[in-house]
Image: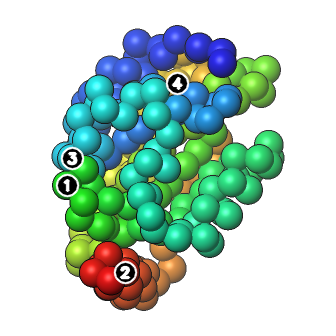
Amino acid sequence: MTSDPIPTLLRDYFERSSIALALAHADDDHPLVLVNAGFQRLTGYPSEEVIGRNCRMMQRGAENRAARDKIHAFLRQDQAANLRTPIVNFRKNGTPFVNLLYMSKLRSPDRRIRFIFASQFDISRSQPDLLADYDAELGSTLTRLSPVLAESGIIIEGSLLTIANTAALIAQAKLTLAEASQGQGE
């Protein structure tokens, strides 16, 4: 596995961000190389327990077939710039939640994918206004992160697309969470 060093400006940005962020290597099994405090609060996992592991460990036994297919396609297709999909994850304590996962590829100027950038948000128990606030913060994060990355010779791909129907997404997340909780009780 190639070990690209994480630029200091990017590491500093992660530390200051208020939303959950994760960074993974672009090669091999996409192990996490950096998570911030927001990620740790959301998932309950301290960084030392997730660095070097693939995020799929948070899926535990959840099927997540559609989300996994989208993630695999995103990772396989070089031209896919970003992805946004709900996926059932589990906190360290075993509590399920529906994670609205956003992923983007971070490239070097020669177009080599250096890292996979991700942001997570629990939509299973949220209100539409909280999701709208998160969307605004993620959009702002991507806007502020672009020049930080550029200084380190990294380009963030794609842009955040606005959710067309926030209420429907939250309703679907609650249904998915109920199904996941039911599956655990069997």
Circles 2 and 1: CB atoms closer than 8 Å: no
User: Can you give x and y, in whole percent of width and height, for residue 2 in the image?
Assistant: 66, 15
Circles 4 and 2: CB atoms closer than 8 Å: no
Residue at image coords 55%, 49%: 103
User: Can you give x and y, in whole percent of width and height, for residue 123 in the image?
Assistant: 32, 70
Earlier residue among tags 2 and 1: 1
- State which mark lies toward you, 4 or 2: 2
From this view, report whether residue 149 is shown above or below residue 70: above
Instruction: Tell me the element at label 3.
Output: loop
Earlier residue among tags 2 and 3: 3
Earlier residue among tags 4 and 1: 1
**Which label number is shown at residue 93?**
1
* Amino acid marked by disc 4: Leu
Instruction: Tell me the element at label 4.
Output: helix
Identify residue for label 4: 149
Front residue of 45/141: it is 45
Identify residue for label 3: 44
Circles 2 and 3: CB atoms closer than 8 Å: no
From this view, report whether residue 49 is shown above or below residue 86: above
Between the residue at mark 2 and the residue at mark 1, the CA separation in whole angstroms equals 17 Å
Between the residue at mark 3 and the residue at mark 4, the CA separation in whole angstroms equals 28 Å
Circles 3 and 1: CB atoms closer than 8 Å: yes
Q: Label 1 crowding class (10 Å Cα cut-off): few <14, some 14-19, many 20+?
A: few
Residue at image coords 77%, 27%: 111
Earlier residue among tags 3 and 1: 3
Circles 3 and 4: CB atoms closer than 8 Å: no
Q: Residue furthest front?
A: 186
Q: Label 4 crowding class (10 Å Cα cut-off): few <14, some 14-19, many 20+?
A: many
- State which mark lies toward you, 3 or 1: 1
**Which label number is shown at residue 183?**
2
